[in-house]
Image (cartoon, helix red, strand yellow):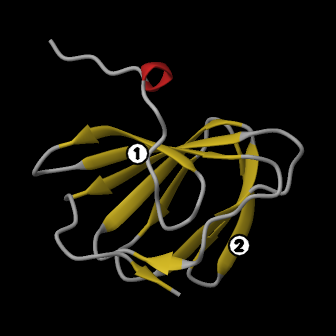
């Protein structure tokens, strides 16, 4: 059995400049933990695969296509492939999101 604790790992660098940890990376799927501190946000971007987000902690604003919504922990958000999406932490507490890409992308994400 393989186990991973992000508490034992250093955050990886990413194009958004926020803390992230790759938790699961196989030929079939990719799972990343994102942590946005108060005031941080991702850059709007488009992924070549479907993505679903699960909010583990905090409250954030998510943009998917032309829809923008405030969501909190315990919420799952779907983002179909080839549609712009983005996260914003407008709260005063950390926002932690599990990002799941299925299937694992072979093409690059496009930053806008």
| Residue farthest right in this picture | 92
Tell me if 75 is positioned left or right of 41 in this view. left
Q: In x, y percent, where is residue 38?
A: 82, 49
- Reply above or below: 35 against 50: above
* Residue under pointer 2: 68
Could you tell me which residue is drawn at 37 percent across and 82 percent down?
Answer: 82
Q: Quadrant of residue 31?
A: top left
Q: Quadrant of residue 83?
A: bottom left
* Residue under pointer 1: 32
Could you tell me which residue is drawn at 21 percent across and 76 percent down?
Answer: 107
Q: Nearer the viewer, mark 2 or mark 1?
A: 1
Q: In x, y percent, where is residue 88?
A: 72, 62
Q: In x, y percent, where is residue 3?
A: 27, 17
- Reply above or below: 6 against 33: above
Could you tell me which residue is drawn at 62 percent across and 35 percent down?
Answer: 74
Q: Quadrant of the N terminus?
A: top left
| Residue farthest top in this picture | 1
Could you tell me which residue is drawn at 69 percent across and 63 percent down?
Answer: 41
């Amino acid at each position: 059995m393989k186990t991973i604790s992000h508490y034992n790992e250093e955050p990886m660098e990413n194009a958004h400049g926020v803390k992230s940890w790759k938790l699961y990376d196989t030929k079939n799927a990719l799972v990343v933990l994102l942590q946005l501190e108060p005031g941080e946000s991702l850059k709007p971007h488009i992924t070549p695969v479907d993505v679903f987000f699960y909010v583990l902690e905090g409250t954030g604003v998510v943009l998917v296509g032309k829809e923008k919504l405030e969501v909190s922990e315990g919420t799952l958000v779907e983002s179909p492939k080839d549609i712009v999406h983005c996260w914003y932490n407008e709260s005063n507490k950390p926002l932690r999101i599990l990002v799941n890409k299925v299937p694992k992308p072979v093409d690059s994400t496009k930053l806008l």
